[in-house]
Amino acid sequence: MQEAISDFYDAQFAVMPQMKENYDRLVQVRRRRITMGDADVFVQCNPARARSTTAAVSREEVANRPCFLCRKNRPERQLAGEAIQDYEILINPYPILPVHFTIASCEHRPQDGAPLEMVDLLNMMPSLCAFYNGASAGASAPDHLHFQAVLRSELPLLRAVEERHAPGDAAARTSDSLGNFPMRFVSLVIKPDFSGMQMLAVLPRLGGISDDPATKRGLVNVLMWKDNSGLLRALLFPRRRHRPDCYFAEGEEKMLVSPGALDMAGIIVTPREEDFERISADDIRLIYWQVGISAADMEEYCRQADIAPFFK
């Protein structure tokens, strides 16, 4: 499968040299590691991600721009794999990591729940981690259903969770029950049995916390992968906000950080060098606290959400 991924990249780069340059620049992207409890958080300075970080996502702004995931609006030379029914596999032109796919619905429809086709991708490419950004939680195209994928080996949080959430435990556990993590999430072990199928069935309906039902559905990030034993796992990040205070601040207080699934999983993307230089563990902890949910919120969320039975 790694050969198939490599061949796809080679074919795309041959007809779009500019995209190859974007991937080559990843070698020059500056990174630093910040250990925060049981998690290693990696901050990267990636100017090419400025467009995504600052994407205008209000209903009016989205309605007034052409959808860049629709086939008719994409570059003619952008290749598309069609291995998943009703979806196209695209190489993300502005990558965060060395392998970075966007899997877009062939139909223009809203980003309204994590699609179960994520599992289909993992069945074909088990070396990947598929992830979903809710419409109010990092999706730069909230009007077009899509998810993304990177190599699971690039995300240390996945290994940390695997070490702490054994298959014999309850199917669902909170991050607070697993260890000392700066971000709050629900870890799911999805077994190939009736209970696992029930869990998959509720996953697309899960959102975050909001008084506005229309916003609530989009306040969530989901990561899904298969561990080395082939067991399907997922991380659910319920959100209460799209962006932290520092995104809207002025002057020295401003930092362009707009968390999506990878940021919530410990890959903090900073398009501006000044933000990369000065962001601290305390800043990151505050960002996670502002856009994520509190311990009390998590307890209430797990009682009310459809996943409550899986904690037993």
Image (cartoon, rainbow, N blue to C red):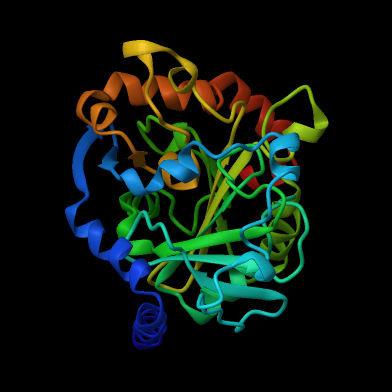
Q: In this view, does 151 lie above or below 125?
A: above
Residue 165 spot, x, y in % from top left = 43, 50
Relative depth, front residue between 82 and 116: 82
Q: Which residue lies furthest to the right in this view?
A: 213
Residue 307 spot, x, y in % from top left = 70, 45
Residue at figure coordinates x 62%, y 43% from the top left: 311
Residue 270 spot, x, y in % from top left = 33, 36
Residue at figure coordinates x 68%, y 70% from the top left: 72
- Name the image quarter holding residue 32: top left
Relative depth, front residue between 129 and 180: 129
Screen quadrant of the N terminus: bottom left
Q: In this view, does 21 lie above or below 61?
A: below
Viewer can see residue 126: yes
Residue at figure coordinates x 41%, y 31% from the top left: 257
Viewer can see residue 226: no
Residue 182 spot, x, y in % from top left = 38, 29
Q: In this view, does 218 lie above or below 158?
A: above
Screen quadrant of the C terminus: top right
Residue at figure coordinates x 55%, y 40% from the top left: 55
Relative depth, front residue between 104 and 297: 104
- Name the image quarter holding residue 273: top left
Q: Is residue 266 left or right of residue 175?
A: left
